[in-house]
Amino acid sequence: GAVVSQHPSRVICKSGTSVKIECRSLDFQATTMFWYRQFPKQSLMLMATSNEGSKATYEQGVEKDKFLINHASLTLSTLTVTSAHPEDSSFYICSAQYRNEKLFFGSGTQLSVL
Amino acid sequence: DAKTTQPPSMDCAEGRAANLPCNHSTISGNEYVYWYRQIHSQGPQYIIHGLKNNETNEMASLIITEDRKSSTLILPHATLRDTAVYYCIVRVAGGNAGNMLTFGGGTRLMVKP
């Protein structure tokens, strides 16, 4: 199946710093990618839809200035958590659309803010 | 997208078939049934999807009732590595708005030796 690569898999940072997470579709082009957040023992929550060449669409309650999304090419979307705080600690997952049928997911990034 | 209802947890003996049910009584005619699973600390993995016919692939079989209000995912010979949370999702294929997946609580399948 199609592969979505997400990097880094784990990051620990100090409060107040910014963290960038990359999501790449390795063997297909994805005009649309999605970013999710997941807290322990909870389901995935959609944060935003990333569209290549245009601004991301954020779900209600998600701060766009806090979670910056850039989708500069058909194979790369990035999520930057700006001025991270301990409450931003979570498991972040991206997904990319494949042939208008399936969504393939990255392996996730565990963010821990100290 | 239609809402789905799944049991929160299930157990299955290793080597036996695991049958995971899903209710989607408000499904629309153009909505597909998708199944994903998530192993601890990993991203969700696509398993199978279907519209109204039963489907089978190397991972599982999907049985959809004739009225399409419910479906069952079958893992024919469950192994310990199949222990995961299984999500049943219905969505319209194609189009930007239809590509969003709304995840419910899923079923936590525990395969036991």
Image (cartoon, coloured by chain):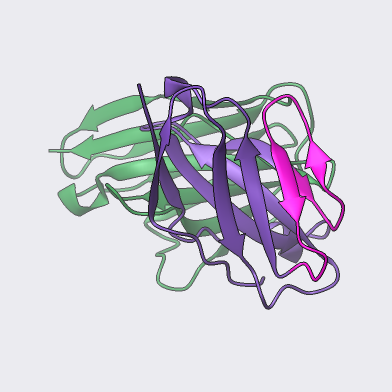
Chain colours: A green, B purple
- Where's residue A44, x and y in %? 44, 52
Residue A99 in view, yes or no: yes
- Where's residue A47, x and y in %? 48, 58
- Where's residue B50, x and y in %? 80, 50
| On screen, residue A107 above or below A38 | above
Magenta stretch: dominant secondary structure? loop
Q: Is residue B8 magenta?
A: no
What residue appears at the point 85 percent right and 58 percent down from the top-left corner?
B52
| In this picture, residue A48 sits left or right of residue A1 | left
* Total labels drawn: 0
Which is more toward the observer, A17 or B80?
A: B80
Magenta segment boundaries in residue numbering:
B49-68
What residue appears at the point 59 percent right and 59 percent down from the top-left corner?
B22
Asked which quadrant contains residue A111, the reply is: top left
Please state, as top left, top right, bottom left or bottom right, where the N terminus of chain A lies in the image.
Answer: top right
Which is more toward the observer, B31 or B55?
A: B55
Residue A78 in view, yes or no: no
| On screen, residue B30 above or below A1 | below
Which is more toward the observer, B7 or A22?
A: B7
- Where's residue A32, x and y in %? 71, 48
| On screen, residue B50 above or below A94 | below
Q: Residue furthest bottom?
A: B26
